[in-house]
Amino acid sequence: MVLVSSGAVGAGMIKMGITPGPVKPTLAKKQALAAIGQPHLMRYYEDIFNTLGVKCAQVLLTLENLSNRTQYGKAKNTFDELFEMGVVPVVNENDTVAVEELKFGDNDTLSAKVAALVEAKYLFLLTDVDGLYTANPASDPNAKKIDVVEDINALDVDVNSGAGSNVGTGGMVTKLTAARIACAAGCQTIICLASQQETAIVDAIAGKQVGTKFLAAKRSARGKKRWLLSVPVKGNVWVDEHGAKAVLSGMALMVVNCTKVQGNFGVQEGLVILDENGAELARGLANYTSSAIGDVLQHGDLQNEFEDDEPFVHSNNVIVTNVETLAKSFVLHQITTYGSVGDLDSDNDSDAGGAA
């Protein structure tokens, strides 16, 4: 078991006698408050686990740690040793050193990437609602709860309301992003009420319906492909029909099949690959900068500037995150769902072994 926790900033505010206001603290102030609150937060967890006769450990991570393959492997080894010793890791973002562009930004994303790292079977996203609804149930009486999510791209829901607290971040949007990452790694994801976690977790593992369940990919990412889920996304690339078919078949994305780029990414930096309708197909590492491709696209000279077999994203650097590529052994009846993602192929490059 791994516990991904927030609360360091809040604990720091309590320690310093600071009352939350309508304006979020600056990044520097949040980092300082996190440094103040972190030891008090861990003392709280240690007291709780001690009453259960369980030992816990503090693990502080940044997005940079997991996006670097060497550090990713070191983190994986640390978790494995903690599991071997029967110690529960308590994970939080290392706010005091994380810079804005290399922050997880929310604990949902952090928990999903940790779940992928340790090859967890389940990811529980605990919140103040009992699952995913078609709209905000607090403001829309017609909102309906969704029990099972299979295709994240096919869901038609309003998740733009509710964006976290004044000292925290997150909301339903970040939980959907987290579900996509975790499901691609073969981890079943469940959104449920935090107030019912004692029974909800046990019931979900027993197969009972709890909250909203995101079905895990049957063919999950392995090795380097799994690591790609932890690489920060710097931009997007839209592709034509031929490019989409190639990517979903586990082949390279050719430059000539790109139709549009967005964001500011460099060589070997992460991006999301989208089809012509904007649905996410995959994630990968770019062979060219966004400016190089963008300039050529603007002048419509792709065919003249690049060979037909010039890869924009190599096949070894692509992980498919579109559910339609997955072979499912079940049928969902009369449910509009969305959610699990997966990779058709794996490679023999493995920084990740067994896990909890």
Image (cartoon, helix red, strand yellow):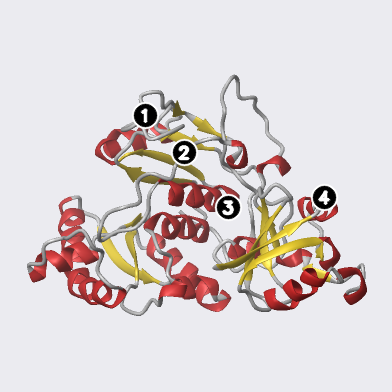
For image coordinates 92% across by 74% down, the residue present is: 304
C-alpha span from label 4 to label 2: 28 Å
C-alpha span from label 4 to label 1: 38 Å
From the viewer's perspective, tell me whether residue 213 is left or right of residue 332: left
Mark nearer the N terminus (3 vs 1): 1
Q: Would you identify the image quadrant in which residue 300 lies?
A: bottom right
Mark linked to residue 241: 4
Contact, mark 4 vs mark 1 (Cβ under 8 Å)? no
Q: Mark 3 points at which residue?
A: 185
Check disc 1 and report its element: helix, strand or loop: loop
Contact, mark 4 vs mark 3 (Cβ under 8 Å)? no
Q: Name the residue under label 2.
A: 158
For image coordinates 41% across by 61% down, the residue present is: 84
Residue 128 screen position, x and y as percent:
29, 40
Between disc 4 and disc 1, the foreground one is 1
Mark nearer the N terminus (4 vs 3): 3
Mark linked to residue 140: 1
